Amino acid sequence: MTRLLRSALCASLVVLALAAPVRPALAAPEGTLTWAVHISLAPTYFDPAETPGLITPFMVLYALHDAAAKPMPGQAFAPSLAESWNLSKDGLVWEFVLRKNVRFHNGETMTAEDVKFSFERYRGAGAKLLKEKVVGVETPDPHRVRFRLKQPWPDFMTFYATPATGAAWVVPKKYVEKVGDEGFKKAPVGAGPYKFVSFRPGVELVLEAHEGYWRKVPNVKTLVLKVIPDEATRLAALKRGEVDIAYSITGPLAEELKRTPGLTLKPTYMPFTSWLVPVEQWDPKSPWHDRRVRLAANLAIDRDGINQAAYLGLAKPASSIIPSQMEYFWQPPAPGYDPAQAKKLLAEAGYPNGFDAGNLSGDMIYGSAIGEPSVNYLNAIGIRVRLHLMERAAYYAEYGEKKLRGILYTGSAAFGNAATRLESYVIGGGRYVYGSHPDMDGLYSEQVNETNLRVRQQILTKIQQMAHERAMFIPVMETAFLNGVGPRAEVHGLNVIPGFAYSAPYEDLKLRKK
Amino acid sequence: MRRFVLRRMAYAALSLILLSVTIFLFVRVTGDPTVLLVEPGASQADLEALRHDLGLDRSLVVQYGTFVRDLLHGDFGRSFYYRMPVLELYLSRLPNSLLLAVVAMAFSLIIGIPSGIMAAVRVGGWWDSGGKMFALLGLSMPSFWVGLLLILFFSVYLGWLHSSGSGTVLHVLMPAFALGWYFAAAHMRLTRSSMLEVLGSEYVKLARLKGLSELRVIAKHAFKNALIPVLTLAGINLVLMVNVAIVVETVFAWPGIGRLLAEGIAFRDFPIVQATVLLAGAMIVVVNLVVDVLYAVIDPRIRYER
Amino acid sequence: MSVSPAPSPSPVASAPVAWRLPRVNLEGLPTVPIAILALLIFLAVFAEFVAPHNPEIGTLSQRFRPPAWLAGGSSEHLLGTDHIGRDVLSRLIFGARVSMIVGFMAVIFAGVVGTGLGILSGYLGGWVDQVIMRITDAWLALPALTFAIFLAAIVGPSEFNIVIILGIVYWTRYARVIRGEVLSLKERDFVRLAVVAGCSKWTIMRRHLLPNVLNSAIVLATLMLGVVIVTEAALSFLGVGVPPPKPAWGLMLADGKKGLMAGYWWLTVLPGLCIVMMVLAANLLGDWLRVKLDPQLRQL
């Protein structure tokens, strides 16, 4: 046995020794910034054409690639690879003037062909819609691109130049045609501030500064994005200095982060609202059918309390299901916390002793932070609900198939504007809509092709006001995304671009001088 | 003997076919992966396009047919989430899992075997109960908790070891210990009972009669023989360690198969789940087959037992 | 696991008498583990009367209160409160109930199914045996935790479903062991005699085989109790365990682990200790029973 054990030990030592040099020999440590990323990085993130409608790929896109126009600090649509653009008087042609002498990582010059090619090969979220609306892309000269619309479309820039789609992000046409889609994901080439160095799917991505970036030469030589799925481990890595920025640290871990000398807690804000919706309001026999009951539920929840407990007071209590930073947002009056008034309303509605309201359902990942305290608050005024948390995939499947009853937790960080949010959650036919008001549906269809922005704003405001007056929802929180920053990062890029959750723009990041 | 081996192999193949159908159907009743690949609130058109893209709009029979056909060509399909060949992903993770499993096994045997021997030799003594308690403690503590405590102590408090990731010898120590400790109790128990059995056997009595010292009897005669079943179990557990270290790999961000599987399940990444489970199944079935055959070689009576 | 060296008749199981309590010599009775289990069972049964607060309702403003003996603690919450202000002591007490229900029910469920199929498989042989054993093989090839996550995703998490899930996951462990025992038992004289005496297969299985494999099943059950409870905790960690706000120890541990680094150690250390105590007690009792009842049963 000893012999066996010894040889087994030797074998494992050999394996260990072989595995040791896997860590890439990076440049001088002061030239490296490292992130602890909460989600798995996939090669599909390297190709803007495959942007799935999640914000996560933009974490990588902002480094590797650049777009004709994209959100930048202080600007929702900032000129990037395009210097300027304008809309023709008939509202049918968008013309973009491209920046000259922009080079991709492989040295090729970016031209209008690349922009057109990138738009046409785009097949991610919203692709169908974009391609329905845009009938043609023209390139009158190498620095000019025209998008011809079928009919006036007020939301063109919202879809083209924000993370709602990845269609504006430019890839080198010649290179993609040479290596193919698969080859491109293995060795992506872009026009962004950082070049691809190495990638282990779901494990680690290493990037290196692209010194020819048009905007400026990046300050930090090397970026490393490490995937660490467990929250507590991310904080441990940050504390030990293994990483400089750790994404998504919540609750008590965030408190600890805040207390730790040398570390700072940095919230970022995505267009992410959480709300509860009593889906039984459409059933005339349900107590929820009575507006007063829904108002009572709205008054029962102490949003500040939840904010303090889950987000250290860094989130924003929500009064609408539309994120306040979205276009066409209308700000309803602040939701109060008044359990006494809530009880009174319940009594007026005929439930002086409260009622059994069944389940408050939600998904395991996000539902518990809002769901658990909400259940307590609702019970406190006599709306007796039980928390029913489901696995995320199962929850959204059943929600979409309208199988759930009672109150449902919903959270959405989908990009777009107030109109796109309303479409998904308020207007009849939406995936998560259990019932709708015909007058609101009518108003909605009125504004779809409205090019007069003032009129459109008025209609969308009206719909939001109606949703508020009818107390269709119990908005709870505009969630904050809490992150930790270590002592080495001087410019961390968090919360610089409105609505963007991650560090960006990468070329601005800076390490603290020793 | 040959017939026995062939029959066993046929059984193994049958089990794997059964497993492939089970896993194929199982992943598909767990829900629609497209919902998870987009933000809630995405448009219906996007969902449908995605579903078509992933081939999920075809009938189950067609999907299974494609799955089996590709499988026979050694193609496990493309991951929904990573959008790359699953086999490539799997093979890039496998070495990490093997490394983790081997080191974990070393820990587990280092804890399990000595405590098992002590327990057998000094029944009821301090060593017996102390060793037993330590081995059992590993079984009693959920590994995510052990992992977190280790990280807090060795990474945050002492600052000695990397909290997570892979790359150096130091990276593997904590996850391997957390994983190995859990399995130590099984090895301890088997060592103990098999030592007791051997110590009670005729030839050990004979060795004692020859006047050999107790230490020699235990070390040379008893231990060697008692080791066979323990190593067999270790072999099987090694395969398990490669495949089921889901929790440990998640806590320590260890890039192994377990984490791949956990993600696969969380994202309903059918091809990943199918591949990891089938390959795990294949490993387990093969190891069982080898064990069965080896035992049959050692003890011919088994061949006639069905 | 398939290490099944030909089982030789175990001395205790030799008496062919039907239905009798295992004759156990109480020497070395592990009193501490039994006391722990008894206490936990007591708490589980009388949770309503023992627990000072409602375990599922808390006040957000009262969150993260430390245990009474620390600065900032109060006798109102002896063991402090959790992240939404629920009383930890009450949750631990009710948690004993959830863990007991989940643990015992799952073990019994797995035991009944596994033992039944094991006896059928071992005694009837032929195609019945083939079918059951092939299913068992395929089952064993699915790593237990994977399988549990699947089932949790399919049927959705609830206390009851977790029982079913764990039962379905672990029945094969019994089936294998029991089948091995039956294979050797059926060659024994008392079974042969029963066949000669004209007993039906059903009678033989029920009256002669079942009582004789019961020892192994009981030993396995005690050992499995720990495995089941730890698995339940792992499921909670992965987000598919007993759903909140139920006070399950595994869930408390998984929930509270965030607080550990922030200094709210009581949220993990206490449920962790409860789990360790219960699993250790069950294992020590199981080990003792194994030595007493069935020295041949070596693994698990």
Image (cartoon, rainbow, N blue to C red):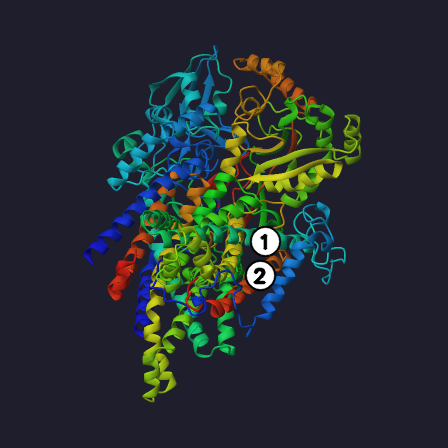
User: In the image, residue C104 lies at what x, y percent?
Assistant: 55, 54
Tag 1: residue type?
Ser
Q: Is residue A196 something one can see in this rendering?
A: yes
Residue at 26% x, 36% y is B69
Q: Position of residue A200 (x, y in %)?
A: 36, 47
- Of residues A134 and B66, the one nearer the viewer is B66
Q: Earlier in the sequence, mark 2 or mark 1?
A: 1
**Residue at (48%, 23%) from the top-left corner?**
A157
- Residue to which mark 2 is pinned: C278
**Residue positioned 30% across, 70% down in the render:** A4
Q: Chain of mark 2?
A: C
The residue lying furthest to the front in this view is C197
- Extreme top residue here? A90
Which residue position is annotated with label 1? C99
Classify C141 as above or below A407: below
Pick the front one: A113 or A321? A321
On screen, B8 above or below C283? above
Quadrant location of the N terminus of chain A in the rendered image: bottom left
Say which quarter of the image contains residue A120.
top left
Expressed as whole percent of the image width and height from the top left, the position of residue C16 reads 44, 64
Can you give x and y, in whole percent of width and height, for residue B13 in the image? 28, 47
Crowd tier of the residue under label 2, counting other residues whose Cα lies within 10 Å: few below 14, some 14–19, many 20 or above? many
Q: CA distance from mark 2 to mark 1?
A: 9 Å
Q: Say yes or no: labels 2 and 1 on the same chain.
A: yes
Q: Are marks 2 and 1 in contact (CB under 8 Å)?
A: yes
Q: Identify the element where label 1 is drawn.
A: helix
Of B19 and C64, nearer the camera is: B19
Q: Height in image: C64 above or below A66?
A: below
Judged from the image, the secondary structure of the residue bearing numbered disc 2 is helix
**Which chain does the numbered disc 1 sit on?**
C
